[in-house]
Structures are given as structure tokens and as C-alpha cells.
Amino acid sequence: MSTPDPTSGVRERLLALPSVVTKKMFGAEAYFVGAAMFAFFAPGSVVLRLPHTAFADAVATGLARPFLSMGAATLNGWAEVPLAGRELESVDPLLRAAHTSGTHAARSAARRRRPQRARRVRSRSGR
């Protein structure tokens, strides 16, 4: 009897969250809300972008560890959550926190992209 793949259950949970889309990034499936990526899979784990307090709590309780990529630890709250032997219900609060964080980031990015009013430029006579 084979052991079920824990990533498939996490994928289902991620896709059940509002406005989530997937894209391939660096050969892995990444999860986005708007333009903001908030989750992707690494071998045997899910990597989530968490708000500071959720990140600190998850690392302090041993539920997650800082995601180490190119030598950058704790960069922007990315946490690696190992899935082997874990009840998926224990990951749900982190998935929701990452999704909420992505939703806020997407809104902020949308506000930054809004075109600003064009300034009036007075033409000078004689030129």
C-alpha cells in the first residue's frame, strides 16, 4: 500500500482559496493572488510567504523553518513547511495566512500601478 502524496492535499486546499491562480515558476507550480505569489512547492514541503507574526509563530513552534534560498534566510517572510507525516489540518492556518498576505500584497501592487493624473504642461509662447 502506497503512502498518499501530501502535496496533492495541500494543492487542493490552496486552489480552494479565493482568486488563486497557478503559474509555473522556476520549474515549480506557484500560487498567486493577483500579481502576488504567496506559495510554491519545494521537494517534500510547501513554501509560504507569511506575515511577520505568523512567520515568527510557525518557526518558534517548529511547524516551519525559514526558507533558505541563495543564502538569504527570512527574506520577506518565506517559510518552508515540511509535509511528511503531518496532518494537513495543521497547515490550514498557515495557508490562510499566506493567502491573506498575498491578497494584501496584490492590492498594494495594484494601487502602485494605477496611472496618475497627467500633469498639465504649459507651453511657452515663442518656442
Image (cartoon, rainbow, N blue to C red):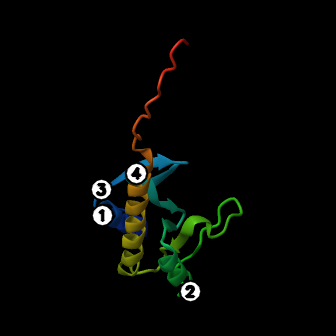
Height in image: 126 above or below 20?
above
* SS at circle 1: loop
117 vs 16, left or right, is right
* Residue 17, disc: 1
Considering only order in the chain, which callout, 1 or 4, is on the residue closer to the N terminus? 1
Q: In this image, 19 relative to 71: left or right?
A: left
Q: What is the spatial separation of the Cα atoms under label 2 and label 3, in whole angstroms?
A: 30 Å
Q: Residue 60 shows which numbered tag? A: 2
Q: Which residue is label 3 attached to?
A: 19
Task: Give amino acid for label 3.
Answer: Ser
How far apart are the two marked residues, 1 and 3, measured between alpha carbons?
7 Å
Decide: few, some or many residues near mark 3? Use Cα within 10 Å; few <14, some 14-19, many ≥20: few
Q: Secondary structure at mark 2?
A: helix
**Percent coordinates x, y for residue 96 in the rendering:** 36, 71
Q: Residue furthest top?
A: 126
Picture coordinates of residue 81 (x, y %)?
51, 73
Instruction: Tell me where residue 69 sits by quadrant.
Output: bottom right
Residue 2 visible, this orientation = no
Element under label 3? loop
Classify mark 4: helix, strand or loop.
helix
Foreground: 118 or 67? 118
Q: Are marks 2 and 1 in contact (CB under 8 Å)?
A: no
In three-dimensional space, the C-alpha distance between marks 2 and 1, rounded to whole angstroms, equals 26 Å
Amino acid at pointer 4: Arg
Label 4 belongs to which residue? 111
Query: Of the residues under marks 2 and 4, which one precedes in the sequence?
Result: 2
Q: Are marks 2 and 4 in contact (CB under 8 Å)?
A: no
Image quadrant containing the C terminus: top right
Instruction: Judge the density around disc 1: few (<14), some (14-19), many (≥20) Cα neighbours within 10 Å.
Output: some
Residue at x 47%, y 78% (from the top left corner): 54
Between marks 4 and 1 in the image, the one whose residue lies nearer the viewer = 4
Q: Nearer the viewer, mark 2 or mark 4?
A: 4
